Amino acid sequence: MGVGRNTTCMEDGDIGGPGDGDGVSTINADMYTTATKRNKGLVLPTPSVGMSFANWEALNNYFRSYGEQQGFGVVCMGGNKSGVKDSETGKSNSLRTYVWRCECHGRPKYRRMVNGRVVTCAEEPILKRKTKKCSCLVMLYGARTKENLWVVKSVVTEHLNHIPTPTKSNHISMFRVRKITQTILKQIENDHDSGAPVAQIFNNLAGRRNGVENIGFTKKDVHNILNRRVRLRLRDGDAVAMINYLDKMTKDNQKNFHLHRLDKTGKLQDVMWVDARSRAAYEYFGDVVCFDSTYLTNKYELPFSNFVGVNHHGQTILLGCALVSHETAETFVWLFRAWLSCMGGKAPAAIMTDQDAAMRKAIRIAMPMPKTRHRWCMWHIMQKFSRKMGSMTDFPQIKVALQNVIYNSLTPVEFEEGWAEGVETFKLKEAKESYKWLVGISYMALSLVRMSFMFNSFVVNLPNDLF
């Protein structure tokens, strides 16, 4: 449907742009006011120089709706403000001009790490990341007139290096989220509060609508919505209540310790706490510590991490707890340094973790060798047996034999002899990939056996008053 001069593209029941209030204005006959509610069969015209809109919101709503109709995303680039300043703040809040572009504008920026800093590559790397940037020239430039109308002053509608189609709107985030109605949002929140993971919530929605193709949004959209909800919930009240509780515990017992940090917006990011009993236990049983971050709280989806040791009765003891926002090296460095500060700077002789690259990097920074030996947790290693060697014919017998050597060896010499015998019996050297993995694991298992032997000697020499 074409629209010429001195016409308005509105039908009964259509609504003007957000913030418009009165919908169609009669100030200027050349004005074009768009609908925020797209009726079936309503086709928006191609933007052209001279189109008039009641306000900035109407123009913004029109170009975004046009982008959804054509199949490309719209990015607000910004604009200039008028020279008239507010008498109270001294700043101008009145926009004078504004620019919108296709989301594929500009060239991709390839970045990499150099000496711990992120730098932009001068040349495109060999391994390229997926990006929408393809130097597309589509843009719309609007300006405000003396009558406070917004008029299109310049426009480019020919896309470069990509071809948008109406169906591609289903793959653009800004258009997908519109399809999440309040009813669907309530269903997502109810399922999440009941403890269901994101994948299960998404599959339930797909089942109710006879297939994923009928949903209109993706699993990532559901994940983002729930993350935003968690951040808002954590910001408002519960975080303050937790910090107040930890402050109260520290006031009652000065040996209790807790530390937290906030992000740039003032929201709680990470928190670590250690009670007086754990600090006292670490003085005697802090030689070997296990750090575990595999727990997950249901309400906030924040990983719960803990430091665990073993006492002279072979019982596990808690040596510290933390809630972390991100499982990154920077977060773990902050956590390890805060925990060591709590423990008077005394680093453990050995620390066991899973095979997480971020943890390995953080331990090298916060607990460098030779003071602290880093070892991988045997439980996590054993979980990989079936994945690395499950295709072998004698896998059940191999697994039992190697587990027996690992868990029942009392000395390093006994372990080495039993391991070599198992490799020879089942001819594991013939499976090159599996054997290569086993060689690396054997050194780790031997280190854990030696650690266990040293720990047994340590328990024997403990003071008698501890028993």
Image (cartoon, rainbow, N blue to C red):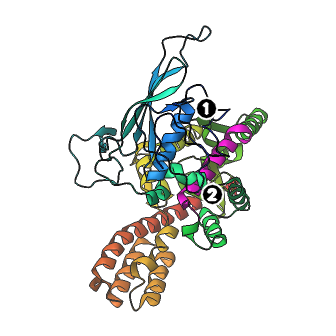
Q: How many marks?
A: 2
Which numbered disc covers residue 351? none
For the question of whether residue 107 can be seen, the reply is: yes
Q: Residue at x 29, y 47 (%)?
A: 160
Residue 439 figure quarter: bottom left
Q: Residue at x 38, y 88 (%)?
A: 392
147, 443: nearer the viewer? 147
Residue behind mark 1: 266
Residue behind mark 2: 296
On whether residue 216 falls in the magenta region, the answer is yes
Image height check: is 382 above or below 166?
A: below
Badge 1 amino acid: Gly
Pointers 1 and 2 in contact (CB under 8 A)?
no
Quarter of the picture containing the C terminus is bottom right
Element type at mark 2: strand
Q: Residue at x 45, y 57 (%)?
A: 166
Compare marks 1 and 2 and give the one earlier in the sequence: 1
How many other residues sit within 10 Å of disc 1, few (<14), some (14-19) or many (≥20)?
Answer: few
For the question of whether residue 264 can be seen, the reply is: no
Q: Position of residue 120 (x, y in %)?
A: 28, 39
Q: Position of residue 97 (x, y in %)?
A: 45, 24
Image height check: is 452 above or below 242?
A: below
Badge 2 amino acid: Leu
Assign the magenta stretch its main secondary structure: helix
Q: Position of residue 390 (x, y in %)?
A: 43, 83
329, 105: nearer the viewer? 105
Residue 87 figure quarter: top right
Element type at mark 1: loop
Find the magenta span and give its range. 215-238
**For the residues marked 1 and 2, what is the alpha-carbon distance in whole angstroms?**
23 Å
2, 144: nearer the viewer? 2
How many other residues sit within 10 Å of disc 2, few (<14), some (14-19) or many (≥20)?
Answer: few
